[in-house]
Image (cartoon, coloured by chain):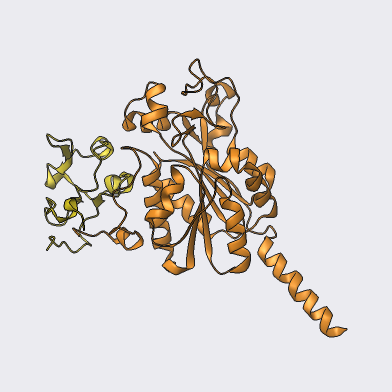
Amino acid sequence: MGPKSPVYEYLRYKKKFPTVWCPGCGIGTVMGAIIRAVMSLGYEKNDVVMVSGIGCSSRMPVYVDFNTLHTTHGRAIAFATGIKLVKPHLKVIVVTGDGDGLAIGGNHFIHAARRNIDLTHILINNSIYGMTGGQYSPTTPVGAFAYTAPYGNIEPDFDVVKLGIAAGASFVARTTVYHVVQMGKIIEKALKHKGYSLVDVISQCPVLYGRLNKMKSPVEMLRWQKEHTVDVRVTAKRSPEELKGKYIVGIFKDEPDMPEYVTEYQKLIDSLKEGATKR
Amino acid sequence: MNKTAEKKPKIRHPEGKIIVFEKWCKRCGICVAFCPTGALANDERGVPYLAAPEKCVLCGQCWLRCPDLAIIEGPKVEIKEEE
């Protein structure tokens, strides 16, 4: 092989590269950010599990050299819950796309958030079903074009952050691929957090979404992300008209003291064991 | 190993600066567009290379943004040609 970066230690770089993603796809950037976050926290490769479902973003476990699991469509969180309950010392990262995590696996997502189980859910949100050819997804904005919405989408979209907060996740944040440095810091915080941590990463799909929505190059899509985001700390100063159609980025909820499912389960087991010996 | 892997990749590596690993590059143009000092440029094939090494300040924009992890960060890495 040629030259090596420190990141390549965490990749299956001899077998699987280059990646299958289209030129300019944001998923690779997110993969780099996840690996750099794991590196800077100093986790062993064997202590990290990456679970994914089906979709473009769910190809990520093929490339990283952690313990990986590529599961059925939408069921990534269900498999991850099982892993976390059996081996609570492992750091479980779930990578899903918007269709995989919110449409097909929407039920698993809200219930894992309700239980507040210690998973890091990274939801790569590119507003379209990329792998199947450009159908509109639950997060396609109203008025945006897709191959199944040639006259514009009329369905209102999901606000992932509000959904996560309402379902009971204890760490909820949103970031974009444009804000790479912020994305790295937020993923690091999400990995350190004990409890269900949801990170909504706004990504770009230049080949399908961009081409239909007058943004042909990945650079134009990244500039669009820059223009259509507002930091959560300055939203109080802005009027509702200014915030219309914009994504608010930043950390929305960070409550480390909420009861976590695996610890609560262990407490229950311990209390029952004590009770059995007393009898 | 397949045929493409046997070919020797061209590596341009001015000392202590970034390296573009051309085998993995998909020519999306993100690194050149976001280079703040203009040190990177596209060659005739669209592959980026370090056109002005003296301008590179190792800010990390290119290797953090590269979706294919084809840009390798500078001075910490030991540079080896393929044998």
The single residue placed furthest to the front in the displayed view is B2
Expressed as whole percent of the image width and height from the top left, the position of residue B82 reads 13, 60
Question: Which quadrant of the structure image shows residue A110?
Answer: top right
State which quarter of the image contains the N terminus of chain A. bottom left
Q: Is residue A121 left or right of residue A64?
A: right
Q: Identify whether A72 is placed above or below B76.
A: above
User: Which shade is chain A?
Assistant: orange
Please indicate, yes or no, whether residue B39 appears anywhere in the rendered image.
Answer: no
Which image quadrant: the C terminus of chain A?
bottom right
Residue A234, position as x, y percentages in the image = 53, 35
Query: Residue drawn at (32%, 32%), measured in percent from left and top?
Result: A219
Q: Residue furthest right?
A: A279
Residue B71: x %, y % from top left: 24, 49
Front in this rendered view, residue A246 or B70: B70
Residue at image position (65%, 52%) is A112
Q: Which chain is yellow?
A: B
Q: Is residue A122 visible?
A: yes
Nearer to the camera, A52 or A201: A52
* Residue found 18% across the figure and 64% down from its top: B78
Image height of B62 relative to A278, above or below: above
Query: Is A125 placed left or right of A28 in the picture?
Result: right
